[in-house]
Amino acid sequence: MNDGFYKHPLPSPPAIDFVSEEGKQLFREAIENGTMEGFYKLISTFQTQSELCFCGLASLSIVLNALAIDPGRRWKGPWRWFDESMLRIYTNIEKVKGGGIVFGDLASLAGSAGAKVEFFYASENTIEDFRKYVIKCSSSDHCHIIASYYRSALKQIGGGHYSPIGGYHCKKDKILILDVARYKYPPHWVPLQDLWEGMNCIDECVGLSRG
Amino acid sequence: MNDGFYKHPLPSPPAIDFVSEEGKQLFREAIENGTMEGFYKLISTFQTQSELCFCGLASLSIVLNALAIDPGRRWKGPWRWFDESMLRIYTNIEKVKGGGIVFGDLASLAGSAGAKVEFFYASENTIEDFRKYVIKCSSSDHCHIIASYYRSALKQIGGGHYSPIGGYHCKKDKILILDVARYKYPPHWVPLQDLWEGMNCIDECVGLSRG
């Protein structure tokens, strides 16, 4: 008997599955447009969150590895590499396992782990600021964005969530979300406007970062 | 003090780093040519091997997830999903942890986990057979190839290794290897001929599948 879930159907619209024909076409067009430059490094270190409340830690591990930040201590055998467990020395990982991590703490953790961090609250910025930042980061492979958002804005099941942004399609104004809850949803394109709305309500639900 | 290693320099040639300008160009050309069709699903489930001898189990988990094969039992919380630990019921995972897994056993394990498996020994086939199979799989997203090869053929450090093949560039006759030892080497393009040579010597060194 198959109890539990094997993925969830991706609510579409607003999302477009990365592996669909439409998703592939958006991808090709965005590459041509030069706004998938961050994709290559990010996708090379893309991983599934290893615990249900580790969306923030998994997103951060992906970005730290994509930025080639050396943790300075061993992961397995002789190798130095980030995964969620390597973030243990900077935060109470057992607490995160039980209830996720709030936005300010994740930003602080990213800095402790060696990243140069800029963090923005949607409530203190405009959607145009966000769009500019998305274009800037997706046009290079030196900076990456982790979005903190509420899934309901995308008609998805779940509460507050973190995932890295894998790229941007200018003309369609769509963002590729590399959803770290890969057991639930595949990577998908969503309207920037919808993601922005999901980011702008996170203050009230940030404790629910359970993926 | 940083003991151990933070990655290894990718021997190039023969490899071309996926994230380099040359690697990106090969990628774009191969997409245009229709031989990256398997890439989208595979990259969506690409993961780092969680133990130093789990290259075979990690490669298999990636492919099982890419094929959307339902393990039929829970992974974490209510979710059903494959990772190396989920393969425990089909094989002695502690033994694999100590010394890797031989090719025949990995093929058998893939079948037990629900995949339709065809497996070929390089010694019983020609490079032209292999090329045809690579073109077939990279032109669809219904079948994927896990290559078993000896790293020395690619001038890489390590012994026998498994990784999925992420795509193919026809004109340049190059294969994209999604190396699961991501702490060591990034995804990279290699000449099909060189990979074939690495596959063709695996019989004598298959016990060394340590990544």
Image (cartoon, coloured by chain):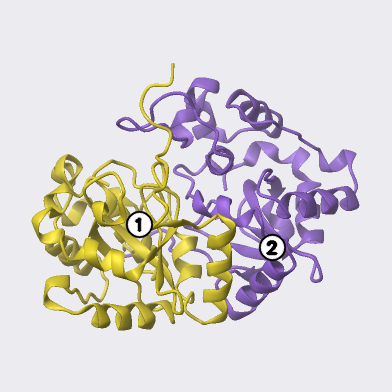
Chain colours: A yellow, B purple
- Percent across and percent down for residue A183 are 41, 41
Instruction: Look at label 2 and name its amino acid.
Output: Lys
What chain does mark 2 sit on?
B
Q: Residues within 10 Å of mark 2 (few under 14, many from 20)?
A: some
Q: Is residue A185 above or below residue B16?
A: above
Instruction: Look at discs 1 and 2 and give the one toward the viewer.
Output: 1
Q: Residue at x 73, y 49 (%)?
A: B137
Instruction: Look at label 1 and name its amino acid.
Output: Phe
Q: Residue furthest top?
A: A1
Give the quadrant of the N terminus of chain B. Answer: bottom left
Q: Residue at x 49, y 21 (%)?
A: B89
Q: Is residue A86 visible?
A: no
Q: Quadrant of residue A98?
A: top left
Residue A161 tag number: none
Q: Nearer the viewer, residue A2 or B146?
A: A2
Element under disc 1: loop
Q: Residue at x 76, y 52 (%)?
A: B198
Is A63 left, or right, of A159 in this rendering? right
Which residue position holds label 2? B155
Circles 1, 2 touching at the beta carbon (< 8 Å): no
Q: Is residue B36 above or below residue B79?
A: below
Q: Residue furthest front?
A: A13
Is there one chain holding both mark 1 and mark 2?
no
Is B124 left, or right, of A18 in this rendering? right
Element under disc 2: loop
Q: Residue at x 30, y 64 (%)?
A: A194
- Percent across and percent down for residue B172 are 79, 71
Which residue position holds label 1? A82
